[in-house]
Image (spheres, rainbow, N blue to C red):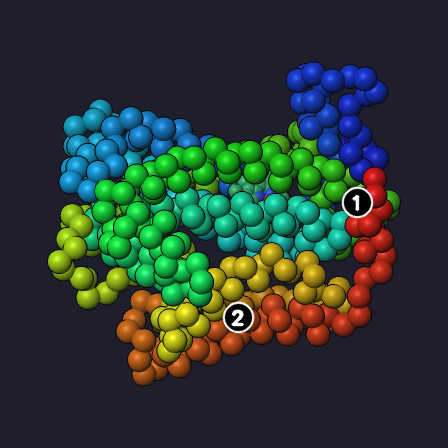
Amino acid sequence: MGDKTPSCQHGNTGTPQGDTGPVAFARAYAGLPLPATLNWWWTFGAVLVAVLGLMLATGLFLALTYTPDAGLAFSSVESIERRVPYGWLLRAMHMTGASFCMAALYVHILRGLYYRSYLPPRRAVWGSGCALMAMLMVTAFAGYVLPWGQMSYWGADVAGRAVATLPLVGGWLGRMVLGGENPGTATLHRMFVLHFALAFVIIGGIALHVMVLHRRGSSSPSGRLVSARDRMLPFHPYFTVRDMLAVVLVALAFVLVMGLWPELIAEPANYRPANPLHTPVDIEPEWYFLPFYGMMQVVPYQLGGVLLAGGAVAVLFAVPWLDRGGRAGEHPIVRLLALALMVVAAVMAASAGRHHAQGVWLLAGRVAIAVYYAYFLLFLPWLGGAGLPDAQDDDEKEARA
Ligand code: HEM
């Protein structure tokens, strides 16, 4: 790009005074100044948007034929696969999309953790992202129940029972989720409505997430605070081109997995209709829930397992306050090692979730919980050292504005 590349001022230029309307809005977004140093990890937000767009489009068509009734759901999905023109393709894209969406989400979160994109003044960006993550997880779970295969049924059963262990509200919440004592047609109605409605709330959430990011400005790989010395480039064409290339590459991987390696994501047991009288030997969720499921399995008291598994997701909300922004955290190798350990712990918990909670898997699962939580509760606050008064000021100034 050389020295002739146009660079722009730091901060959002916004629309010219008084200039509103969609064209001005699009121009302001296209011209948004971003640090020139942003790398490929910054393309995963765009990948997420693209995969979610595909999920919405395919989901709307699937919903035209799907029937949320315990006696009809499985056969309605079979009929989508066999009788609806290109129904098999729609369903394959929707199922593959769910896995790609969660994979892209995890990469997006890991990018944020490694580059500490959550530090002030971007706490609100992180918080809105966490809310999106929670909604995506609920949506993915609800969607998995819909085909009413063996794993759908028993997955709903495990979730209902897990929720029911919560003190005070547990019994009521369990019945709210299932619509009764056991999974059935009422569960399917609830899951269908939740799955459908949340998809649109998520779209609103994404708009909010990106709006907040545009107000607070992007972080950069060279440091969480983008200084006035950083060279800035407009979003279009410098970052749109790279985002589009990333989307094309992910689309290629998507087609390969969907066409040649579907067993990577599909669970064969879910191609058998739900049978309330036959509990499968191994009930396990989709891969993206396995770490949390594993944590739930290896704790002797059910409530403890539910709290630790839920806490493993909830702790992400607290990250901007847990990281005190000190010296050790500034060291890229230390940060990378700590993050890698946390990822290994999540994989270990997932492996424990795929096996019976006994012997070496029980031990591995418990060690994994300790290492996973150590990253958030020990590494971030204590190895992080002293606070970040300057950054805190940024946040306060922003809040006052
Ligand atoms: C539906 C899910 C999500 C979508 C569609 C989405 C989309 C995006 C997009 C388009 C960007 C700008 C490009 C980029 O930086 O990659 C972004 C930035 C960001 N997202 Fe998300 N996001 C989602 C979930 C999350 C989650 C779960 C978190 C964290 C828990 C998160 C945290 C962030 C942060 C901190 C940034 C700013 C990065 C920077 O400093 O430049 N996002 N997101």
Q: Quadrant of residue 379?
A: bottom right
Which labelled disc corresponds to residue 399? Answer: 1
Residue at 74% x, 66% y: name it.
324
Q: Residues within 10 Å of mark 1 (few under 14, many from 20)?
A: few
For label 2, the crowd category at 10 Å Cα-Cα, with few meaning under 14, some 14 to 19 and many 20 or more, is many
Where is 299 relative to 98, above or below? Answer: below
Residue 10 in the image, given as x and y percentages of width and height:
82, 39
Query: Relative to residue 304, is residue 73 depicted above or below?
Result: above
Separation of marks 1 and 2 at Cα, in angstroms: 32 Å
The percent coordinates of residue 60 (x first, y second) are 36, 28
Viewer-side residue, 110 vs 238:
110
Please tell me which residue is depicted at 68% across the width and 65% down the height of the picture.
Answer: 322
Residue 255 left/right relative to 46: left
Q: Amino acid at mark 2?
A: Tyr
Among the 4 quarters of the image, the one containing residue 159: bottom left
- Find residue 158 and report its image quarter: bottom left
User: Mark 1 is on which residue type?
Assistant: Ala
Count of marks, rendered view = 2
Q: Residue at x 63, y 50 (%)?
A: 127
- Quadrant assignment for the N terminus: top right
The residue that mark 2 highlights is 372
Q: Going by the image, does 103 lie left or right of 210?
A: left
Q: Label 1: state its secondary structure.
A: helix
Query: Tag 2's secondary structure?
Result: helix
